Image (tube, grey):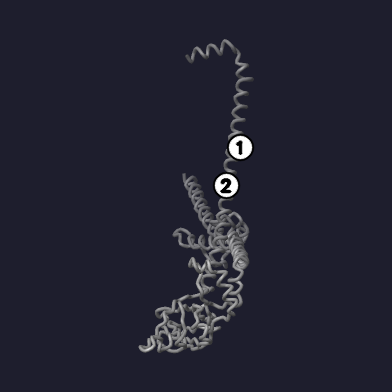
Amino acid sequence: MYFLLRFVVFCLDPLGLGRRFVIRPALNLSWNVYDRVRSKADEKVGTVRELVLRLGLIAFAVVLIIWLAVFMYAAFYYLYMPAISHTRPVHMQFKTCLETSTPCTFPHAHVSLTKKQQLLMVGQAYKVIVNIDMPESPQNLDLGMFMVCAEMRDYDSMLRGHSCRSAMLRYRSPLIRMISTWALSPLYVLGWKEEFQQVPVEIFSRYLEERQHPITDVYVEIQSQKIQFYTVTLHIVADFTGLRYIMFNWPVLSAIVAISTNLFFILVIFLLSWYHWSDAKWLQSVQIKYARLTKSLEPGVILSKTSSLRDDDDLFAYGDKSDIADVGGDTLSDADAGDLVLVKKAASGKEATQDSFRKRHAKKTTADH
């Protein structure tokens, strides 16, 4: 088959001109075009890969920086902002008189806030409020004013604060009560609304927690035997001022400002770090020191640090130190380059001395013959 193909080609082109001037140049041109196209395609693929890699690294760095800024603000908010309020139910107790079946003592209660732990933040002012749900009964309307007292004690039962405040039901005229009753009668009938008032009594307006004596217990007392109430609750509300007030009342604005500030400082630190690590001078100095140490530990190389015995040839060779490079590819310092050049010249001088000795020995042997 091969010889048949050769014979056909010879018959078609006996002198080989077509193959020499047409077929071979066409094949070479096609191969060159193919190589160029393939190289360009490989370059484009490499460029696209590099571009995708750089974009991925940039996106990862941006996401990491933004996440770090948000995390820093969230951690600061968690550590700096205390709990807004603490609510505890107050279960009142009293002794009943046997003759009149009315309370013989003032209603009082013990409220446990925590077990030897610090519930309130030190340095933060708090409002201590007692809410009393009182029905609009004739007895409460005739009650008038009454006193509500509270004591703040620590885990050693030491008194850390005591205060009493007066309170009473909000006055409404009979006409207003009748109109509101008629207007809200469907809700009263369906049980969606009740005829009572919530009386808030602010016992402490600005109570400050002490680090050595955290508050663990609160004692509440209503100094009235005729009072009627549904429930009593204790509210401890933080009274924010300054930065805490801004962060609590404008959370979105404060978050935007804080996260933007964190982003600015993180970007500054990132750019300074990148500039420092991109500068290779300190890395080159470390490489030079490492090369000096490794060469000094080699058994066949002795680096002489004394320059008093250098001759004129050594001083001339001292200027040719640009060919000596360190590990990182940069030229060594003057002292290191001079020492290495002297070592090279010493080795070359020794070899030259041995060559001259051999030549003289050969001449002497020839003369003797």
Q: Tell me what residue is drawn at x 53 percent, y 59 percent.
A: 343
- Upstream in the sequence, badge 1 or badge 2? 1
Amino acid type, residue under disc 2 in the picture: Val
| Residue 65: percent from left, percent from top | 57, 60
Q: Residues within 10 Å of mark 2 (few under 14, many from 20)?
A: few
Regarding residue 90, the answer to whether it shows in the image is yes
Question: Which of the 4 quarters of the picture holds residue 288?
Answer: bottom right
User: Which mark is nearer the camera, 1 or 2?
Assistant: 2
Q: Is residue 4 left or right of residue 97?
A: right
Percent x, y for residue 128? Answer: 51, 81
What residue is drawn where x is 49% and y is 53%?
Answer: 354
Q: CA distance from mark 1 to mark 2?
A: 18 Å
| Secondary structure type for disc 1 | helix
For the residue pair 188 and 63, the one nearer the viewer reads as: 188
Instruction: Please give the label number shown on residue 40.
Output: 1
Asked where in the image residue 111 lies, by quadrant, the reply is bottom left
Q: How many numbered discs sit on the rendered protein?
A: 2
Q: Is residue 3 above or below residue 349?
A: above
Task: Give the amino acid type for the residue marked by disc 1 in the picture.
Answer: Lys
Determine whether, in the image, residue 98 is placed left or right of residue 365. Answer: left
Secondary structure beneath disc 2? helix
Q: Can residue 207 be seen here?
A: no
Residue 347 place in picture, x, y as percent:
51, 56
Q: Residues within 10 Å of mark 1 (few under 14, many from 20)?
A: few
Q: Give residue 52's mark.
A: 2
> Which is more toward the observer, 257 or 207?
207
